[in-house]
Amino acid sequence: MIFSTKHSYLVLRIGLAAVFFWLGADKFFHPASWLTLWVPDSQFVYIIGIFEVLIGLSFVTGVFMRFFALLGIIALIVHAFPGGIGKFMARDAGLIGGLLAILLWPEHGSR
């Protein structure tokens, strides 16, 4: 049946993977657009890009998903503090919600 926790979990993982792949890759193609007050130089933008691609890769492969979900949550929360409430806050809140779902998903429900 298409309506199952197995399929829901897969859609959540692939959706989050696509977002993190996109965000990570964009940091390599357009690093200047990511330079803000919280990113001091372009080297740090590339490090964040690698981190985001690793999150996406983790969700596609199913390896270390909870670990990367937790790191992603921490990174998004840390990112939110210097910027305050802004135009990206809704996106980040949605991503945190998805990452929390991965982090808290019961083991038996993901198979």
Image (spheres, rainbow, N blue to C red):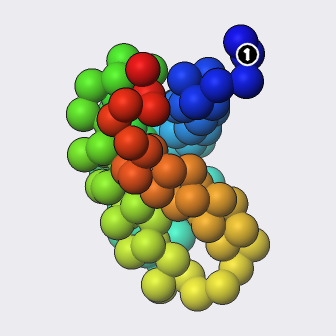
Residue at position x 56%, y 50% in the image: 98
Q: Is residue 18 left or right of residue 111?
A: right
23, 46: nearer the viewer: 23
28, 82: nearer the viewer: 82
Q: Position of residue 69 (x, y in %)?
A: 37, 48
Corner quadrant of residue 56 = top left
Residue at position x 40%, y 61% in the image: 73
Q: Position of residue 40 (x, y in %)?
A: 37, 69
108, 22: nearer the viewer: 108
30, 73: nearer the viewer: 73
Q: What residue does disc 1 label?
A: 2
Q: Mark 1 belongs to which amino acid? A: Ile
Q: Position of residue 87 (x, y in %)?
A: 75, 72
Image quadrant for the N terminus? top right
At mark 1, the secondary structure is: loop
Q: Is residue 81 left or right of residue 68?
A: right
Image quadrant for the C terminus? top left
